[in-house]
Image (tube, helix red, strand yellow):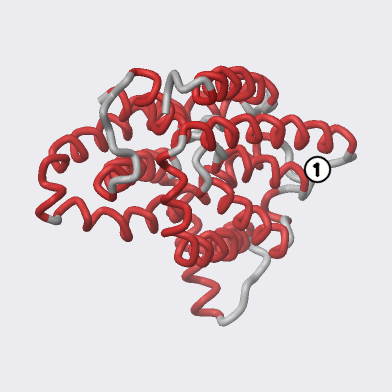
Amino acid sequence: MLLAVLQGVSELFPVSSLGHTVLLPALFGWRIDRSDPTFLAFVVALHLGTALALLVFYRADWARIAGGLTRSVVRGRIGEDPDERLGWLLVAGTIPLALVGVFLEEPVKRLFGSATLVAGFLILNAFVMFSGERLKRAKSGDIALGALPYPSGVGVGFSQALALLPGISRSGSSIVTGLLVGLDHEDAARFSFLLATPAIGAASVLEIPRLFAPAAHGVLIESLVGGVVAAVTAYASVTFLTRYFRTNDLRPFGWYCLVFGSVCLVLALTKVIA
């Protein structure tokens, strides 16, 4: 349940929920085989709770987006309606992550057993956010989310694939990319959170069936309850973050990742954690 709370809070915060899910059991000395397929399935169940929370929070947006997509399909072309454009931007942004996830799923899973690698990626995550904020300040002017070019939307979607590396934040990388293609912090965060729903949902479709395998029956109940807990805490997180990014930036999260990742890296290198 602690991991479920952690997932709900940290999935949307740009601090890598996956990295924390690997590092905290190591810090607390929990005997969890992080490379076991059932552990990954448990983690994805928590992600499913997060996706449901996002769907509820953005339910009005998704209703308009669904309507816009339907109208454009019936018409046979994409019009100037912002909801239509946003819908197809989300489609364009989701495809890259789906393709990368299919081809790199197995190699990435092998990284889950190394606290040293995860701590190193968490430090890298900090510098991604620092660099993004620095480059953003050097740019002038912002563009509206509804006017974002489709290649830029694909770029934001592709950046989510970095989160397949435990320690790199999906929301952090996509928000940074959103900033670099011209969005302000509020729109970059909104686009990132909207993209999270199909991305996490697709991962769940691939992994959740493993929970029903005979070997996974021992974690099925924990996964279901954990998904509910993650959903509640994720809803609170997105409520906070949508307000936070109206006037604030990514740097406080970068400092957190740098400090926490450095501490964990030292502990891993000195064999205090593994």
Q: Position of residue 126 (x, y in %)?
A: 66, 29
The residue located at (48%, 48%) in the rendering is 196
Q: Position of residue 117 (x, y in %)?
A: 54, 37
Whether residue 235 is visible, yes or no, is no
| The one of 117 and 79 positioned closer to us in this rendering | 117
Whether residue 237 is visible, yes or no, is yes
Would you identify the image quadrant in which residue 247 lies?
top right
| The one of 164 and 61 positioned closer to us in this rendering | 164
Q: Position of residue 42 (x, y in %)?
A: 27, 42
The residue located at (47%, 32%) in the rendering is 115
Q: Position of residue 136 (x, y in %)?
A: 81, 37
The residue located at (42%, 59%) in the rendering is 106
| The one of 218 and 204 positioned closer to us in this rendering | 218
Judge whether 225 appears above or below 194 on screen.
above
Q: Is residue 65 left or right of residue 217?
A: right
Judge whether 42 appears above or below 238 on screen.
below
- Amino acid carrying label 1: it is Asp
Q: For mark 1, what is the residue?
A: 142
